[in-house]
Amino acid sequence: MKSPEYDLDAVRSQIPILRTHIPMNNCSQAPQCSATRAAADAYLTSWNEAGMDWDAWIGEVDAARAEFAAFVGAQAGDVAIATSVSQATASIASGLDFTGTRRGVVASGGEFPTVGHVWLAQERFGAEVSWVPVRDGMIHLEDYASAIREETLVVSACRGYYQTGFKQDIGAIAELAHEHGALLYVDAYQTLGSETFDAPSSGADFVASGCLKFLMGIPGIAFLWVRPGIAERLEPSITGWFGRENPYAFNAQQLDWGDGARRLDTGTPPVMEAYIARAGMAWMRELGLAAIADWDAHLGLHTVRGALARGLEVLGPIDEPRAPMTAIACTDSHAVEAALRERGIIASARGPAIRLAPHFYNTTDDVNQALDALADVMESAP
Ligand SMILES: Cc1ncc(COP(=O)(O)O)c(C=O)c1O
């Protein structure tokens, strides 16, 4: 029987909610673990005892930046701090020029709505947005090939589709985008932490992610990796004092730009969130990202196969490439989520599907129990 390379019992002992629940909702919110709890406590203690310690707090934000960089195989100087993926995407968009002949945005129909909204909001500034369709829960390369043109300024492709778990081939999309001189923006929120991802060799020009899904964090902080050499081409109108060469120069009448991706930083950064984000990612790196990815892939496959074996209807891909999340069709996904919660299982409703997204701390038995409960719930109230 397959087991992870790390000590699963030891990992599970670090996640208190496992004593009472089976969390299977990493596509929505990861559970609290000892490391993230301790990090939150460390911030609260510092705030309480020192009253104010900005040097240490900003140091912690930079440590989180460096941790994210290491997580995606990059340099800290190529990572900007944001408060959400929406804000990171909007910062990029506000630095692009949509007034020339190259003004097209080709976005996948699998983008999380917020990303689509940011691109649509650029139409006021000249952007022309077109969509690559989702077909059978998947997004096909040939549809990118026909959508991307010489007029395309940026291609927007999520790595994992939040609705079905379908994973896009970022390298292949990058080739198509770059052949036509377009930039590639990737939202990796639904996959980062469940697979190893090396931003510099991925082909992407921008990679954004928040922390509350497979990175074991909380809302309020997001990271944006920018390919070296590209940040300097952007003068984002969504900006703030932390985007300056020296944030402490306090000159309201001078707009200069910080080094590398730092020019995409905006206002006072999310300090407590940075403590927590760093701790979650650091714990995962300690356990081994490849080992986590391997176990997540196993759990994902076990979930999709188990769902089919129980006669449940799976939306989207059955085979690779897919995130560890499985979407199961149901008419009232919120009622199903509530019924599962009564049985101690935390799943995530989204539109026409209930989503089960195990992560590195789950066992195959967790998955079996969740699927048995789901099949039972669906039989009485589909
Ligand atoms: C793929 C993806 N991108 C973005 C978001 C949301 O981004 P934010 O709320 O940080 O703007 C989500 C879900 O919350 C998501 O699943």
Image: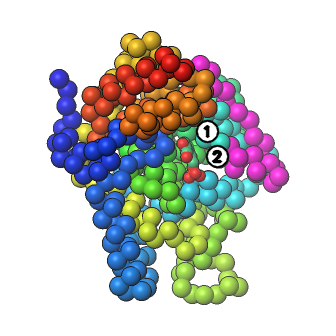
Q: Quadrant of residue 277?
A: bottom left
Residue 284 in the figure: left or right of residue 209: left
Q: Check residue 128 for magenta coloring.
A: yes
The boundaries of the magenta stretch are 116-138
Residue 296 percent across, percent down from the top left: 33, 34
123 sits left or right of 22 in the view: right
Q: Position of residue 286 (x, y in %)?
A: 24, 52
Please name the amino acid that badge 2 sits on: Val
Residue found at x 18% / y 47%: 10
Report crowding for label 1: few under 14, some 14 to 19, many 20 or more residues within 10 A (C-alpha). Answer: many
Residue found 40% across the figure and 80% down from its top:
47
Question: What's the coloring here?
Answer: rainbow
Q: Amino acid at mark 1?
A: Glu
* Mark 2: C-beta under 8 Å from nearest atom of ligand 1: yes
Q: Is residue 145 left or right of residue 12?
A: right
Q: Quadrant of the C terminus?
A: top right
Q: Name the spot of residue 77 as percent of width and height, x first.
A: 44, 65
Q: Relative to the observer, which residue lies in front, 233 or 224?
A: 224
Label number found at residue 115? 2
Q: Quadrant of residue 280?
A: bottom left
Q: Residues within 10 Å of mark 2 (few under 14, many from 20)?
A: many
Q: SS at mark 1?
A: loop
Pointer 2 with pointer 1, Cβ within 8 A: yes
Q: Nearer the viewer, residue 8 or 5?
A: 8
| Residue appearing at x 68%, y 38% in the figure | 106
In which quadrant is the N terminus drawn? top left
- The alpha-carbon separation of the residues under discs 2 and 1 comes to 6 Å
Residue 111: mark: 1
